[in-house]
Amino acid sequence: MKRLLALAALIFATPALSATYYVDCAASNDKGAGTSPETAWQTIDRVNRSSFKPGDSILFKRGCTWREQLTVSSSGTSGKPITFAVYGSGAAPIINAADLVSSWTDNGGNTWRATVTIEPTLVVFNGTRGTRVASVEACNGDKKWYWALKTLYAYGTEGLEVAYPDQIEAPARDCAIKIQNQDYVTVQDIDTRNANRFLVLVQNSNYVTINGGLHTQAGYAGAQINNWVAGGESSRHITFRNMEVSRAGGNGITVPGDAGTVGYVTIQNNKVHDNGWDSGTGAGYNPWNAGIKIWGGANLGFPGESDNALIEGNVVYNQADNHGDYSGTGIWVDQWGENAVVRYNYVHDNAAYGILVENCLATAAVPPQVYYNIVHSNNKGISINRDVTGALVYNNTVYANTRGGLICEGVGIQTTMVKNIFKNNISTGNGTNLVAILGGENAGGGSGNIYEYNCLGTEAAGFVLWGNGEYKSTCEAWETAYGGLTHSVESDPDFTDASRGDFTLLATSPCIDAGADVGPSSSIALMPGSSWPNNVLTGDQRKTGLWWEIGAYLFPEGRPPAPPPTPTPTPTPPPVGLAASFTFSPEAPAQGEQVQFTDASTGASTWDWNFGDGTRSLGRNPVHTYAERGTYTAVLWVGNGVNYSQAVKTVTIGTPVRKHLPKR
């Protein structure tokens, strides 16, 4: 009996092992155990009806498409999330929230009709979103459609099943992936398509990570935290990372917290583009769209409900404005409570603002921070807008925005704009390089706003707007209105090639070593060689040069020293051209293996290596070991005391090869 009791105690004390389940669209049915590729389930419905234990994984086969909605049914625990990922080879699996439309009937007048019971927010013709019109009669061109009374009408000069065979899709589900009332969930590398509302919806759930995947075509938003259905809901510790989100009718990635608690949100290394095509007003739709938008009701009576957001390393472009006001913004922080950080983003060609911060909690212990972003070719650049106190805008590069570069503006005479700080920014080539109005100029409802150590380019007519209609054409005139010195750089910043989007600094730039130290928490700058969204390189301002750079990029060696004077002219040999070059061996290194980097440059006297994993070396021929597998960008900067040159190579670190000892 004692042995039986001991055995029973051991069984009950042993934690349940995690399981892996497989889903294959080509499987014959859902009757298998699902625990191997050979017994895989066929449908997502089978997944939705199942319960899972913490640590379980559900793997979807690559190359498959399901016309279903994944509704997560179980929670994980800390360190043991429920994971939805992929297996096999080929293209990523797709969860398509739309059904194919078939059985078209000739409606006359080059229109066709088919039964579609759910009103669609979009209709897709062979991968291209069609145009919704207001009547059957208005269906007078290719891909135009109208819906009423459970019937879809579309234009066609011939049968639509001939023009678009099995290629017309209408959303039949609100979401492709829905995570509601579940915690500790990870979704990895699964693509989504064609949702009536949201491609990915997270509601009243915590510790959720969405990593990777191509997410395109949704009526409302690409990925959304949705806590406004019932007060008291909470979504905290949510991460959206490495996603591509495009062609949503409203926002790309959005975090509203109007009636619940939302916080510790990370939006990192995503590609967000071509959203905001719809100006509709359906339930749950927000027409004030942006590529990335967070808002929390902080100044609407819900202080403290939204906190700790990090938006970094994203590339955000081509958001459309179909509503007016601020719609079509790249990154938008609105009514946030505590600690919103927007950094290292590349934001361009959006219809409204590049980055907009507005109406945030005035009593926040940690105010909004916007630093080391590249913002160009939008309607407006970076704006701190209406009722913002203490925002920190440091070391951004703002270029060629149509109506304004750096902007600090209220809305109306009662707006409070207090103690916002703009330092170390480059703002040139914009319609107006600095706009400070309606409190931003420290008048009316504004005070204590600081503008120092910025580069506003060469003096020009109206390059600063200081108060409504008060344009300044010289730094002297602006400083007189400002009431003090601004320590501005009054010349061109000398970008490497702004016309090609390269805003790194040439060695001749007056912005090198010309900035102010704004503290260690803001010292990590962009490095040359960065690319978005998956290879954003950074370096420390405190470890390079004499002083901080102005703008988003660090110059690796600081300002080159002037050559020593020559007492008397003496014949000298022709100078050797400076050209960075290097090799590394082995050519296919493994994780944990030493990699020898060998300088092959000409004319160099200094070397600065960035190995792409956050480590550097100033040696000529360093040896480096990569701790993790992956693809890294190794960068060598060389100098000769006057000029600098750069070489870049990709290093792919593979899996270590096990060495088997011979049996004795």
Image (cartoon, rainbow, N blue to C red):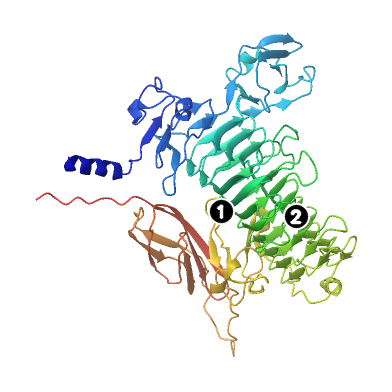
Q: Amino acid at mark 1?
A: Ser
Q: Position of residue 413 (x, y in %)?
A: 88, 58
User: Looking at this rendering, what residue extends furthest in the front direction?
Assistant: 1
Picture quadrant where residue 479 is located: bottom right
Q: In terms of secondary structure, where does tag 2 sit?
A: loop
- Within 10 Å of disc 1 (Cα), the crowding (few <14, some 14-19, many 20+) is some
Furthest residue in direction left, as rendered: 664
The numbered dot on residue 359 is 2
Q: Can residue 76 be seen at all in this image of the molecule?
A: yes
Q: Is residue 555 above or below residue 101?
A: below
- In this rendered view, identify the residue nearer to me: 224 or 253: 224
Label 2 crowding class (10 Å Cα cut-off): few <14, some 14-19, many 20+? many
Q: Residue 287's x, y, as percent?
A: 74, 39
Q: Residue at x 45, y 61 (%)?
A: 611
Mark 2 or 1, nearer chain start? 2
- Expressed as whole percent of the image width and height from the top left, the position of residue 167 reads 59, 21
| Residue at the spot of label 1 | 531
Mark 2 or 1: in front is 2
From what the image shows, is residue 211 above or below residue 615? above
Dividing the picture into quadrants, the one containing residue 150 is top right
Q: Which mark is residue 81?
A: none
- What is the C-alpha distance between the residues marked 2 and 1? 32 Å
Residue drawn at (61%, 64%) of the image: 553
Residue 64 coordinates in the image, percent (x, y): 46, 28
Q: Amino acid at mark 2?
A: Asn
Left or right of residue 478, residue 455 in this image: left
Give the quarter of the figure containing the N terminus: top left
Name the residue: 58% across, 81% down: 563
Q: Is residue 155 visible?
A: no
Specify whether 286 is left or right of 627: right
Residue at the limit of the structure toward the right, as seen here: 469
